[in-house]
Image (tube, helix red, strand yellow):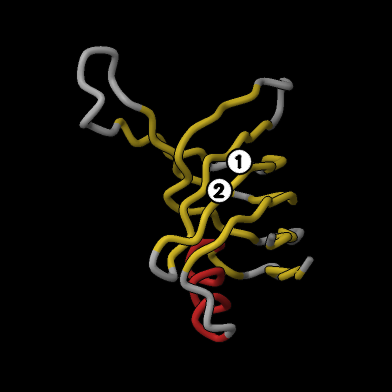
Amino acid sequence: MQKIKIEKDQELMAALEKEFIKNNLSEGGFTVIGAVDEACISNMPKNDASQDILTEYKMPMELSGTGEIRDGKPHIHACLSGKGDKAIHGHLHWAQIKTWYVSVYLY
């Protein structure tokens, strides 16, 4: 199993895409675990699965998720939790790492 560590002061999705290109990875699966300081996820409205409702969170959060590499780009469904122990889940659009790091385990 290969590990990629995304250090602080990076945006997760852009950093992952750069690593996938560097390692010539165009498809595959992975898991993520770590902490982010801001993120944007989307979910679908009740009556229209073809639409996305994007929500941005500007607070430190724990992150875990599962992803796939689609044509060299990361696609992640993530669970995030912050102050108050409330979990949110959805399709991850971006996540800014400022304080800690995120580990990505490829399989």
Q: Residue at x 73, y 22 (%)?
A: 85
Residue at (59% x, 83% y) in the render: 23
Which image quarter: residue 104? bottom right
Q: Where is residue 57 in the image (x, y as percent from the top left)?
A: 50, 38
Q: Nearer the viewer, residue 55 or 15?
A: 15
Q: Tell me the quarter of the picture where residue 29 sits.
A: bottom right
Query: Which residue lies most toward the top here?
Result: 46
Looking at marks 2 and 1 on the same chain, the residue that comes earlier in the sequence is marked by 2
Marks 2 and 1 in Cβ contact (< 8 Å): yes
Is 65 situated above or below 90?
below
Q: Residue furthest bottom?
A: 22
Residue 37: image tag: none
Task: Bin the neighbour count of mark 2 within 10 Å (Cα to Cα): few under 14, some 14-19, many 20 and up.
Answer: some
Which residue sits at x=42%, y=49%? 93
Q: Where is residue 33 in the image (x, y as percent from the top left)?
A: 73, 49
Tell me the residue that label 1 is attached to. Answer: 59
Residue drawn at x 56%, y 61% is 28
Disc 1 secondary structure class: loop
Gap between marks 2 and 1 measured at Cα:
5 Å
> Which quarter of the figure is the C terminus placed in?
bottom right
**Which amino acid, by three-letter code, is at mark 2?**
Glu
64 relative position to 18: left or right: right
Residue position marked by numbered label 2 in the rendering: 38
Q: What residue type is labelled 1?
A: Met
47 versus 19 height, above or below: above
